[in-house]
Amino acid sequence: MTKTPEPGPVPAAYDMIVVSNRLPVDYEEGPDGSTGWKSSPGGLVTALEPIMRAADGAWVGWAGVADREFDPFEHDGISIIPVPLTPDEIEDYYEGFSNDTLWPLYHDVIAPPSFHREWWDAYVRVNRRFAEAAARAAAEGAVVWVQDYQLQLVPRMLREQRPDLVIGFFNHIPFPAYGIYSQLPWRRQVLEGLLGADVIGFQRAADAGNFSRAIRRLFGYTTRGSTIEVPDPDGSVRRVVARHFPISIDAAGFEEIARRPDVQARSREIRESLGNPSTIMLGVDRLDYTKGIRHRMKAFGELLRDGRLSVEDVTLVQVASPSRERVETYRQLRDEIELTVGRLNGDQSTLGHQAIAYLHHGYPREEMVALYLAADVMLVTALRDGMNLVAKEYVACRFDNDGVLVLSEFTGASDELRQAVLVNPHDIEGLKDAIELAIGMPHRDRTRRMRSLRKRVRENDVANWSATFLETLTGTGRITPGVSEALALSLDALAGAERLLVALDFDGTLAPIVDRPDEARATPPARDALIRLAATPDTRVAIVSGRALASLVDVADPPEGALLSGSHGVELQLDGGSVTVDLRDTEREHLRRLTRIVEEAAATVDGAWVEFKPAGVALHTRRLSPHVGVALQQDARERVTRALRGITVRAGKSVIEFAVRSNDKGESLRRLRQHAGATAVLYVGDDVTDEDAFAALEDGDLGVKVGQGKSIAAHRVRSPEEVAELLGLLAERRATAVGDPPGWT
């Protein structure tokens, strides 16, 4: 515990800000009257600490003490900005609206939610206070990452105050289906609040889908795959990404604790204190009605009652940490659970063997790891859970590759941990069968399952989660070399599509960027893979480029039967030949004037050149220094906008394009999908202009961004060489799924 800091100055301007209901520190008063701050490390803190230190970050949140105002201070290298709450606000905003309205509603109304207008008013007021604190602390263009359901209005409030900010939001709990969500009287206001973010993250794909459907039902906004098109007040359209980023744990940290001799010794002590039963089953939960504690106790009690299990052989340890004990629903739940434990122990325990060891405490991490090591079977039977990190903690600790995880299919963790014994906790008979299966599972099967589970948890740890989210939000971060496991799994799913369209940008994707665009060529491995894909049954290949169609045909040397899109979709070459959009007379006149203006701008700087297209022109600045190129592009943009109206301007890598007919790669991809009759699409691109194509992807499609830069694509590779690797992998798996093309050996 560090001493209470002296009052600090007004917050500085920070480049990275995390906003959450609680700070990563707790305020404590010692027995001698001393006061100070103690770290309350969790998975989120572990993931974000190094990022925040590197980015000069600050954490905005409530200190956990009512009616106390604290000045900003620094703790363990992180700037802390406390937000005060009054006792009434804690009761109405936190215990009321957050935990007695939103929590039960978002967990499928397992308990009935309460709707009170004064709670909503407090929620709005407190959200505004958090937003104002973040806005004051944020530097120009800073990244602000808002956490969880207590602060769903903050993104829009921030955007209204500071439109320069990059705003992310992550929802740690489920998002319900529209039929449930629609019960909320303030349903539109909450969605409007969330849509202030640039990226909205969810635990499961189903949650992101529920959110997008709610947006369509209530606002009618266009949604394409994971992208929502949100109209801004100035008439422009802002793209918001809403997709799943499953959270995880510090897997290496848990395993490190589990390997300590003192923790392993404590694990053996736990088994001895329980009478060394053949099997210890473990449940670890907050005392919450969503966790399914009653269901697992009912199943266990019936197994003992019916003689399918013996209390001499099997003991259930249930850790139920205190939770929201000022809320009446939780007080009632505690009474019910403790009554059930008493009855079951009274009916089934013997003098030497207790049926259930019930522990209503919170424990330090080392003790929890010892419990995980002592447990032969881990029971995670939540009725609804955004993720459930306990399941991942158990797996991370089992470095001995032993133990069985029984996991509810209604947890987010079940999407990833498929080698667990998956159960429907509402089905008591099925739950009883699953418990018996876990207890009697042969050692070889336990080992096989646990190895698979541990591989998944290690590779998708909390650091990977935060990096993936921030990479999507900001376009920065380290890209994993080669084809990542997550991308390979997505390719597996795509390979089995009924009719597949493989569409790719050319420059920077199939072909490395070169100084002379007429010398660009696809890498030989990429071209070979495209030829194999084009020859595979029910598979079409398309190249989608900003180049004029004639130039694209010349440099791409497309495989037989390939579909081509040039000039950002103005030109299409389908199976029946080329198609060019006919221009109206006014558009032809605008094109003539546009060409003259851009040529005049290009003539002012040696090395710039103009590419002519059917509906526009492109000014290339690749041969210029970055500073000179940017200045020339800005000069050309100003000349065009002063002289002509209704011109579409599109900036790319070292190029700015002007068009008299609005079209983009997204519209082109939709036309290609329709022509090919594709049931699934892979799109790969490297440029800003490819974002329109990524936005056009639908559920079941796959987008891959090449290189750095902000993108709504779900996956990334580093270079055209890795695009070739990706295509080769897809060609192999597609051939396995639908059969080899004629002539393959």
Image (tube, grey):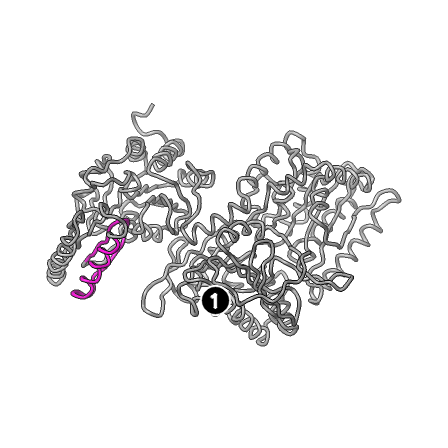
Q: Is residue 158 left or right of residue 405?
A: left
Is residue 680 something that shows in the picture? no
Specify whether residue 654 is painted magenta. Answer: yes
Task: Name the one closer to the observer, 334 or 144.
Answer: 144
Magenta residue span = 630-659
Residue 313 picture location, percent across and down: 79, 38
Task: Name the one closer to the observer, 128 or 678.
Answer: 128
Amino acid type, label 1: Ala
Specify whether residue 513 is painted magenta. Answer: no
Residue 11 picture location, percent across and down: 52, 65
Which class describes the residues within 10 Å of circle 1: few (<14), some (14-19), or many (20+)?
Answer: many
Mark 1, residue position: 135
Total marks shown come to: 1
Residue 607 picture location, percent across and down: 18, 47
Image point 65% across, 70% down: which residue? 68
Q: What is the secondary structure assignment of the residue under circle 1?
A: helix
